[in-house]
Amino acid sequence: MKTGGLGLGLGLGLKKNQPQEEPEIQINDGMLIEDIDNSVARDIISVFEKNQAASNAPPLEDAAFIESSLKLIQEETKAQIFGPLMSVAHQIDSGISTVNDFKTELSKSQADLLNAPHARNPPTQFITRSVDRLQSKSIEISQILSAYTAKFQAFESIQQQNPIGKILKSEHHALIRVASKVAQVRSRYEALRNEMLQKLPTNILTKFEESMDSSEQASTSDIIETNYQSYITEKKNKFDKWREEIDLFGESTAPPPAQTTKFSLGAKPALGGSKLSTSK
């Protein structure tokens, strides 16, 4: 009996020593400051005075310097990341343009091959157009060489005495050699294309057009620019919404914007002790 009484007494003592939770205080818009508990009213007045002091305080001397530094960091970061990315995008666009040029030439050549009555009945439209293009290129190169030859003939008497004339003459011969190399490369290109056209299947253009339709596809650089601007706009809108929903105590009721880096600016609560819930 004594043992049971002792246990009962200890149990009652422990219950008395347990800390009791503070009651939750309800506040609504229709209440006056006199209707609120003194401790909570003092906290509200303190927050109001701090907000007034912060709004009336003069701007910091280094605020402009800090803001300009942040803008400079942002611009340099964008240049370091966005610049090389746009360079790669332009290279991709240039490659797509080159592929389109070859696709057009291949389409014309295949059309000539398909429309020809027979490959053994020359001259076909493909051969005729290729010869015309080579003749036009040959005439153009001949005109350029004639212009350079006429230009250098005027200084024929000075070339023996002037070292610059010798240099120009050597460059003239170098241009002639380069022109002949270009003609050889062009001939090899035409021969290789003719050989490929004979080996390629007739449906290759259809498959290629289905895999890449560049006429309707936006350029890679434009896609990157659009996505980057959308990202900046969305991030700014989220932050503005988060700032607009800040209540009287300096806390935002909206979820904070998602952080894409490891750096975080956490908001500190204005009141540390009381539990407040605002109901309208």
Image (tube, rainbow, N blue to C red):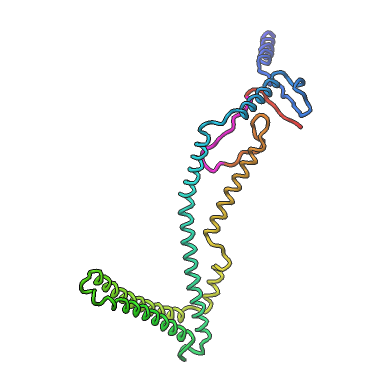
x, y percentage for residue 18? 66, 17
Q: Please, which residue is most extreme toward the bottom here? A: 121
Q: Residue at x 58, y 49 (%)?
A: 231
- Quadrant in which the C terminus is drawn: top right
Q: Residue at x 25, y 77 (%)?
A: 156
Q: Please, which residue is most extreme toward the right here? A: 30
Q: In this view, does 210 lie above or below 190?
A: above
Q: Is residue 120 above or below residue 255?
A: below
Would you identify the image quadrant in which residue 187 lies? Answer: bottom left
Q: Is the magenta stretch mostly helix, strand or loop?
A: loop
97 drawn magenta: no
Most foreground residue, 90 or 124? 90
Q: Please, which residue is most extreme toward the top here? A: 2
Would you identify the image quadrant in which residue 176 lies? Answer: bottom left
Q: Give the range drawn in magenta.
A: 259-271
Most foreground residue, 241 or 268? 241
Most foreground residue, 58 or 259? 58
Lateral position of residue 101 relative to residue 248, left or right: left
Q: In this view, does 164 lie above or below 138?
A: above
